[in-house]
Amino acid sequence: MVLVKKVKRMTRAEAEAIFARFAEIEPEPKGELDYVDAFTLLVAVVLSAQATDAGVNKATRRLFELAPSPAAMVALGVEGIEEHIKTIGLFRGKAKNVYALSQMLIDLHGGEVPGDREALEALPGVGRKTANVVLNIWFKQPTIAVDTHLFRVGNRTGLAPGKTPLEVEKALTKMVPARFMLHAHHWLILHGRYICKARKPECWRCPIVQWCRFEPKSPPPNKPLPKHV
């Protein structure tokens, strides 16, 4: 992750205002990965590393039909998993991890996805970010998973500056008001994905622009010249 230009940190009052605005616009934000239970969510998140949610959803549609459980995934085998996710980046390594984590869920957790961080992070292919996503979405824990979008938004806006994803996560944990913690992850990732974009943030339509520390603000795109008759 590349650290963006250093800016002045927001105040807690400004952070409160930002999340109140997010909540006003979208009270119940949702992730964009397709899943039906904790296991398919876990697999989808593991596969989403360095891949788009749309690409993962396309690949897992058939995979989850054939292997909706750890036992079925193990029965499919590494090569069988590869066949269905080969359109995703790093698919060979991911297939091995999905197979191995499925086997571990069977061996250690009775085929169920554990609801605590330590057990999740012990699974192959599961790091802190993946664990946080699963804990947040499925187990409704107020965790924040810092991906490239959250890292960028946290630094660029001044909401949670940090040199590493963990620093940004800890800063966000302190800055986000408790009543907004459950949904903070989704609000920020969607904001970074669709408005506060990496190359050119769309400041002209940003709902939190008045509190954002980023300068200079991006102007709206030029309107096309009228056609001459």
Image (cartoon, grey):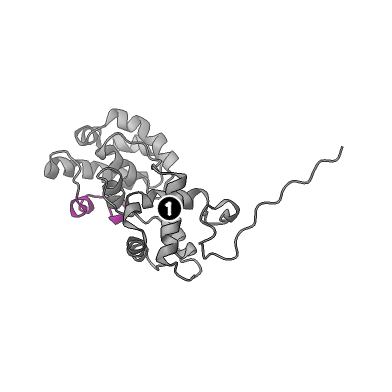
Q: Residue farthest to the top?
A: 65
Span highlighted in magenta in the image: 116-129
How many neighbours does mark 1 have within 10 angstroms: few (below 14), some (14-19), or many (20 or more)?
A: some
Residue marked by disc 1: 20
Residue occupying the point 31% across, 49% down: 133
Q: Helix, strand or loop at disc 1? A: helix
- Looking at the picture, tell me which residue is in the foreground, 143 or 124: 143
Q: Is residue 118 magenta?
A: yes
Residue occupying the point 28% across, 56% down: 128
- Looking at the picture, does residue 93 appear above or below residue 76? below
Does residue 148 appear in the picture of this structure? no
Q: Indicate the position of residue 7 as horizontal and vertical percent values.
A: 49, 70
- Looking at the picture, does residue 224 appear above or below residue 74? below
- Looking at the picture, does residue 176 appear above or below residue 107? below
Does residue 178 appear in the picture of this structure? yes
Q: Indicate the position of residue 138 as horizontal and vertical percent values.
A: 27, 42
- Looking at the picture, tell me which residue is in the foreground, 54 or 77: 54
Quadrant location, the N terminus: bottom left
